[in-house]
Amino acid sequence: MDFEDTPQEAEFRAKARAWLEANAPSPEEVRQMGREAADEKQALARARAWQAKKADAGWACMHWPKEYGGMAATPIERVIWEQEEGKFAVPRGFFDIGLGMCGPTMMAYATEEQKKRYLPVMRRGEEIWCQLFSEPAGGSDVAGLRTRAERDGDDWIINGQKIWTSGAHYSDYGILVTRSDPNVPKHQGLTFFFLDMKSPGVTVKPIKQISGASGFNEVFFDNVRIPDSQRLGKVGDGWKVSLTTLMNERLSVGDAPPPGFDELFALAKSVEIDGQPALAKDDVRQKLADWYVQSRGLKYTKFRTYTALSRGQTPGPESSITKLVSASNLQNISSFGMDLVDQGGVMTDGETMPAGGLFQHGYLFSPGLRIAGGTDEILRNIIAERVLGLPPDIRVDKDIPFNKLPVGK
């Protein structure tokens, strides 16, 4: 494992850092972003402006092929850019699904004409995409979906419901997996499309979250027509296309946002328990030691991925380990931070609370992260089977037609 940049990588990192230092938002702009955080329209406008600035300078989607606006950068250059950009308070979040999951899927399966139409404007943030996979009855089983697609000449008629769709309420387009043949086993009867989210019959209903936000949505399809020209992959090949999206999702949904060990350590130094800094307490120090060890373990596990990318290799399933541990750490660290501020832990006011209410917001956000991009249980299965080489779970429904599977009453 190589922890150091090669000379070429160090040169690229310096170039990326210099551009960010010259173009990232100023401290006053960052403060203004904080004041506008609750106003989604203003936040989206700032995010679009930043994405367009990156695109004009060649930093947006740099790993994409040149014909779609990228510069064919290496995977490790993409990692370096994301590391450096992560050090700055820049707008983010609105384009992650489109650029990280939908774009790669379109590159793999769309026609050349469609790629040239949709990818460049996606890269600039002019059009936003969402991912329409999860369903109320499916749980973590993507292949258990029930949204129907029925052929009608050159069109498909879509009926059904998706849930937990991030950003659907402001998205222009979406990728959609449907069941086109219920008479075959569940993984074989799926067909994949992309669609205009403003199509007649599409209804988006935001879901109110415990944090007060509404980033997730229910999406209903009532006789929605999608041209067959917007099918991605062959009829019945939707599971194969979905795997392309899901593999890219594992890379896009990885590290948890703050608070982490560093933020908790700073909080423990600043708050007092019984008249002395919390950091002086043995039980606090023990918790900090545990999370420090885990943070180092995560760091060096990620270095395995970076080393593979640097050598031109395909990373293994390490991203599942990173996501599993970091998501649960976010919940545990946030909860402990709330305990340290005592009764203030129930308050979320960023103006008056220690760390600006970061731990409270992290705690409310963390349950969703343990589901998004693969639940804890799914990730444990991946680690068990692909890292440890344990036998897979027994699947009694493997060869049974979907319409013959027993359902609850």
Image (cartoon, rainbow, N blue to C red):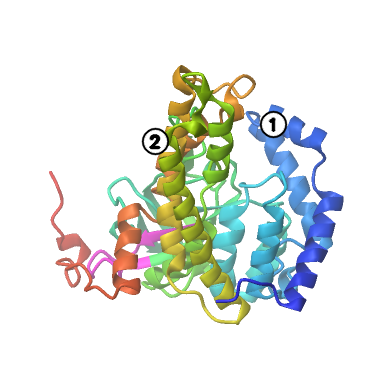
**Mark 2 highlights which residue?**
283
What is the chief secondary structure element of the magenta stretch?
Answer: loop
Q: Position of residue 157 (x, y in %)?
A: 41, 56
Q: Which residues are magenta?
A: 175-190
**Mark 1 highlights which residue?**
34
- Residue, far right: 22
- Residue, far bottom: 312
Relative to 29, say whether 293 is above or below.
below
Residue at horizontal 70 percent and vertical 27 percent from the top: 35
Mark sitting on residue 252: none
Is 327 in front, or is 50? 327
Amino acid type, mark 2: Asp
Relative to 287, say whether 1 is above or below.
below
Q: Position of residue 409 (x, y in %)?
A: 12, 43
Q: Give the crowd class for mark 1: few <14, some 14-19, many >=20 residues within 10 Å.
A: few
Q: Is residue 44 visible?
A: yes
